[in-house]
Amino acid sequence: MKKIVMILLMLALLPLASCTPYHAQGAGVGGAVGGIAGALLDNRNPWRGGLIGAGIGAIAGATIADISVRGSQEAVSYGRPVEYRTEDGRGRYYAEPESDYYNDGSTRCRKVREQVWEDGRLVRDHVREVCEGRREERRY
């Protein structure tokens, strides 16, 4: 039984090897919350519920982080607000550029306000800084 649990855990963590820091943070938080919820909901076998909940939570957390990063980068690239909605209309992601570009050493940065709505309620309101690096090299 322990061998099966270890194999399942390793398979669940395998996709995290190619994640960016944002994906890893989202997957970590989602996995922790999902694991706790799964363990509390499965009265017969809390370990099974915890593993299943952690797997589902990690995938959901990484997906939400991906949408957040992509939306904020698109808002900066296009210079206008970006909005994503779920098919059923219950979830909404909104990103709007909040400032003009400013230089921070060798990077050009801009602030973006992100808002996440669920069932008409504001769940998250966050300001993210999106930066573009400039590469300088000597040529002869």
Image (cartoon, rainbow, N blue to C red):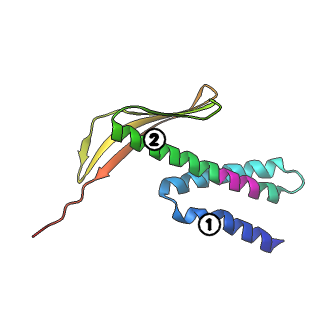
Amino acid bearing label 2: Gly
| Among the 4 quarters of the image, the one containing residue 73 | top left
The one nearer the camera, 80 or 8, is 80
Q: Secondary structure at mark 1?
A: helix
Under mark 1, the amino acid is Leu
Q: Residue furthest right?
A: 44
Q: Where does label 2 land, which residue?
A: 71
User: On the image, which quarter does residue 28 sit in?
Assistant: bottom right
Q: Nearer the viewer, residue 40 or 19?
A: 19
The residue under the point 9% across, 70% down is 140
Counting every numbered tag in the picture gives: 2
Residue 59 screen position, x and y as percent: 63, 53
* Residue 95 magenta: no
Check residue 88 in the rendering and tell me which mark sits there, or answer none. Answer: none
Q: Which residues are magenta?
A: 51-58
**Residue 14: assigned label:** 1
**Residue found at the very far bottom of the displayed protein:** 3
Of label 2 and label 1, which has the lower sequence position? 1
In front: 137, or 27? 137
Pointers 2 and 1 in contact (C-beta within 8 Å): no
111 to the left or right of 36: left
Is 55 colored magenta in this rendering? Answer: yes
Image location of residue 138, percent across then percent down = 14, 67
The 10 Å Cα crowd at callout 2, few under 14, some 14 to 19, many 20 or more, is many
Q: Residue 46, percent across and down?
A: 83, 56
Horizontal side of 83 relative to 129 (left or right) equals: right
What's the residue at 79%, 71% (across, down)? 4
